[in-house]
């Protein structure tokens, strides 16, 4: 997608005035503001209706800009070299003299950092003198947005501007890894863990237990607010049915994540289809069993949280 300079200028202008704007990333759209400004950060929490004890991810252009705020270590550099920019967030220790707003993290000790790959947002970050705090651009606990239109649906006229960047290519939030102690995955996401571990000869793992209550990892999350049933073979006629492989018959209530078990494609389509189903006012969503491998693990994690009641 071509970079439209006047859109970038408008974004810079608003961000410098402590406004929040929608920005595209390859995972999902973010609600972005100056990470060094207390005023701007408080606006994000208000707009999102997000509990204040749930810290934000800060988006950087490169390591140089990151070094002002965080202490970096060997394992960080190793992961960075191979997978950044990309759908990955790393937790680091915050430097004492960092300018990061105290409202981003109530304890002020660690910071979640990410280097988004989307070319338009990278171009924007390069022009700015501050990094961008950006949670997913949805009201707390709802479905993350993957297009400009989705962001509009969430916030209406409450935000002044959304930077157009097409549809998010990954369609699932970033994978979060805590590097402040023995590396551990805090959230499954758009970067498949096997790929990371195999490539770097690491054994970073995700333990499902306990994680449900991690800040921002609450049980009811990513939710279309419609009852949802998983691992369904024979759907009801009245429900929306999410599938991962092609069936011989086709029904109006069938929504294909993929027609050939392609898990990247399924990830890309998940939030888009949940939003569409919600718009069509279905009262129940049933989901075919999704293979629990690679990105399928992330998809199952999101489905499980979305279906929690
Ligand atoms: O793909 C993404 O990560 C998107 C795009 C916009 O970058 N952002 C996103 O942000 O998903 P959000 O705020 O919706 O989710 C961030 C998660 C939350 O669960 C939060 O609790 C966790 O990251 N988090 C943030 N800072 C943390 C920290 N210092 N330690 C542990 N967890 C942290
Ligand atoms: Mg979110």
Image (spheres, rainbow, N blue to C red):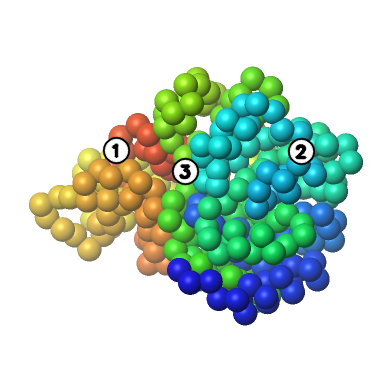
Q: Would you call the spot at circle 1 few (<14 residues within 10 Å), some (14-19), or many (20 or more)?
A: some
Residue 39 place in picture, x, y as percent: 84, 61
Residue extending farthest to the left is 248
Q: Nearer the viewer, mark 2 or mark 3?
A: 2
Q: Nearer the viewer, mark 2 or mark 1?
A: 2
Residue 86 place in picture, x, y as percent: 52, 46
Is residue 59 shown to the viewer in this render?
no
Tell me the tag on residue 289: 1
Residue 177 place in picture, x, y as percent: 59, 32
Instruction: Give the residue at mark 2.
Output: 70
At 51% from the left and 67% from the top, the residue drawn is 165
Q: Nearer the viewer, residue 84 or 14?
A: 84
SS of the residue under disc 2: strand
Earlier residue among tags 2 and 1: 2
Instruction: Give the residue at mark 3.
Output: 190
Rounded to the nearest angstrom, the CA distance separating label 2 from label 3 is: 24 Å
Rounded to the nearest angstrom, the CA distance separating label 2 from label 1 is: 41 Å
Give the quarter of the image for residue 230. Answer: top left
């Amino acid at each position: 997608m071509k970079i439209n300079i006047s859109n970038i200028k408008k974004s810079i202008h608003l961000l410098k005035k402590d406004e929040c704007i929608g920005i595209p990333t390859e995972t999902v759209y973010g609600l972005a503001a100056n990470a060094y400004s207390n005023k701007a950060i408080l606006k994000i929490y208000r707009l999102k209706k997000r509990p204040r004890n749930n810290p934000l991810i800060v988006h950087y252009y490169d390591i140089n800009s990151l070094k002002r705020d965080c202490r970096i270590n060997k394992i960080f550099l190793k992961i960075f070299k191979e997978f950044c920019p990309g759908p990955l967030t790393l937790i680091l220790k915050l430097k004492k003299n960092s300018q990061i707003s105290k409202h981003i993290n109530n304890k002020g000790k660690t910071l979640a950092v990410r280097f988004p790959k989307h070319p338009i947002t990278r171009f924007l970050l390069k022009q700015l003198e501050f990094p961008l705090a950006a949670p997913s651009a949805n009201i707390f606990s709802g479905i993350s947005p993957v297009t400009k239109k989705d962001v509009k649906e969430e916030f209406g006229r409450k935000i002044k501007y959304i930077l157009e960047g097409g549809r998010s290519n990954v369609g699932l939030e970033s994978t979060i890894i805590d590097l402040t102690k023995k590396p551990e995955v805090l959230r499954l996401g758009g970067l498949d863990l096997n790929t990371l571990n195999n490539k770097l000869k690491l054994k970073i793992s995700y333990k499902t237990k306990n994680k449900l209550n991690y800040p921002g990892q609450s049980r009811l999350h990513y939710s279309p607010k419609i009852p949802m049933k998983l691992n369904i073979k024979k759907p009801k006629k009245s429900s929306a049915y999410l599938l991962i492989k092609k069936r011989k018959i086709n029904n109006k209530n069938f929504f294909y994540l993929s027609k050939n078990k392609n898990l990247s494609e399924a990830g890309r389509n998940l939030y888009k289809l949940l939003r569409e189903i919600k718009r069509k006012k279905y009262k129940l969503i049933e989901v075919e069993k999704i293979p629990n491998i690679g990105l399928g693990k992330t998809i199952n994690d999101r489905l499980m949280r979305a279906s929690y009641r």
